[in-house]
Image: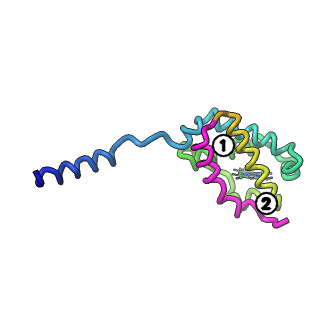
């Protein structure tokens, strides 16, 4: 009995490790169509919202939309390759303030809700983006 249980336990551990992985965060967010609509709406709002719009003056929104969607796809296991600038480089000239960052994240959170993304994947995505604050925010005012 004893000699049988060890191989059985080993076998079940191997089987558990080989079990099909769950859906990626990208899939749980709703995949490409949902991520794109959330990104588009967030950036369209950020470009006109009085709290954030100054940085978007003269910026071609289409390119930023595409790039942000690729970045979110890349960090959430969607298999895309992000080919844009580092966060520090992309935002350096804007001298973004903490309150501008927070306003943008608020808009993103609202748009994730509006698109019907569940709290789980929503918060996981926001958690992945939060550490970028230290590279994006370069003004203390
Ligand atoms: C978690 C927060 C943020 C993320 C993940 C993010 C991500 C990005 C990405 C991926 C790009 C494109 C970079 C490239 O293609 O090279 C970008 C560009 C840009 N972002 Fe952000 N961003 C964030 C916060 C903000 C905030 C708070 C503002 C302003 C209030 C802002 C304003 C801009 C502007 C104006 C550009 C275009 C820069 C240019 O083309 O010169 N971003 N961002």
Q: Residue 140 is drawn in which quadrant? A: bottom right
Callout 1 secondary element: helix
Report the colour scheme. Answer: rainbow
Q: Label 1, label 2: how many angstroms apart (C-alpha)?
A: 22 Å
Q: Write the start and end of the magenta stretch as one range.
A: 117-141
Within the magenta stretch, is there residue 94? no
Question: In which quadrant of the rendered view does residue 92 lie?
Answer: bottom right
Q: Residues within 10 Å of mark 1 (few under 14, many from 20)?
A: many
Q: Is mark 2 within 8 Å of ligand 1?
A: no
The image quadrant where one finds the C terminus is: bottom right
Q: Position of residue 107 (x, y in %)?
A: 76, 44
Residue labelled with disc 1: 69
Mark 1 or mark 2: name the one nearer the start of the chain.
1
- Would residue 65 appear left or right of 75 to someone viewing this image? right
Instruction: Characterize the local packing of mark 2: few (<14), some (14-19) or many (20 or more) Cα atoms within 10 angstroms.
Output: some
User: How would you classify the magenta stretch by its main secondary structure?
Assistant: helix
Residue at 12% from the left image edge and 54% from the top image edge? 2
Q: Can you give x and y, in whole percent of width and height, for residue 81 in the image?
A: 58, 47
Viewer-side residue, 33 vs 122: 122
Above or below residue 125? Residue 112 is above
Q: Are marks 1 and 2 in contact (CB under 8 Å)?
A: no
* Residue at horizontal 64 percent and vertical 50 percent from the top: 126
Residue located beneath label 2 in the image: 98
- Residue 27 at what x, y percent from top left? 54, 38
């Amino acid at each position: 009995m004893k000699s049988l249980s060890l191989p059985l336990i080993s076998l079940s551990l191997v089987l558990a490790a080989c079990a099909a992985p769950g859906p990626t965060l990208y899939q749980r967010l709703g995949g490409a169509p949902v991520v794109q609509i959330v990104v588009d709406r967030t950036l369209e709002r950020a470009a006109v919202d009085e709290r954030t719009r100054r940085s978007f003056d003269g910026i071609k929104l289409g390119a930023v939309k595409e790039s942000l969607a690729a970045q979110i796809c890349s960090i959430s296991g969607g298999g895309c390759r992000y080919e844009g600038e580092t966060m520090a480089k992309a935002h350096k000239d804007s001298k973004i303030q903490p309150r501008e960052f927070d306003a943008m994240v608020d808009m993103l959170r609202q748009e994730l809700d509006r698109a019907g993304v569940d709290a789980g994947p929503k918060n996981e995505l926001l958690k992945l983006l939060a550490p970028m604050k230290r590279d994006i925010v370069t003004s203390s005012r």
